[in-house]
Image (spheres, grey):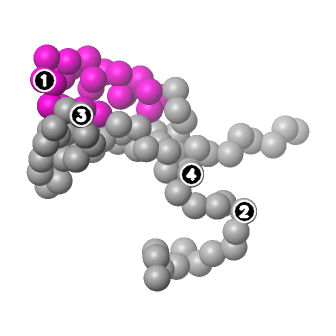
Amino acid sequence: MSKPSPQRLHLVFGGELVDPQRSEFKDVDKIHVVGIFPNYASAYAAWKAEAQRTVDDAHTRYFIAHLHRLRDEEAAASSTEELGN
């Protein structure tokens, strides 16, 4: 029996930027969260759909965040650990 592949969660989100040359959102309360996806391929498909939908708006940009990179899954930690000190 083979070991299942580790889950690699990705978040797709976007919105209107202050300046198309920077990654600063005009209004963080209006960030569009597309969803969380179990792998890069499905996240990329969702990102591409949103990017194509908003292609005519130079100030709107979508991103893929690699949630699995935010923490070291090998390190022991509590589910309620504090973020930052």
For the point 46% across and 74% down, the residue is 83
Give the CA separation, mark 3 to mark 1: 13 Å
In this view, the mark in front (2 or 3):
3
Q: Amino acid at mark 1?
A: Asp
- Pointer 1 local density, CA inside 10 Å: few below 14, some 14–19, many at least 20: few
Report x, y in % for residue 72.
Answer: 64, 61
Q: Tag 1 or tag 2, which sits nearer the N-term? A: 1
Specify the segment rendered in magenta: 42-62
* Element under disc 4: helix
Q: Nearer the viewer, residue 75 or 23?
A: 23
Q: Amino acid at mark 3?
A: Gln
Give the CA separation, mark 2 to mark 3: 36 Å
In the picture, the quarter occupied by the N terminus is top right
**Disc 1: which residue:** 57
* Element under disc 1: loop
Disc 2 to disc 3: CB gap under 8 Å: no
* Element under disc 3: loop
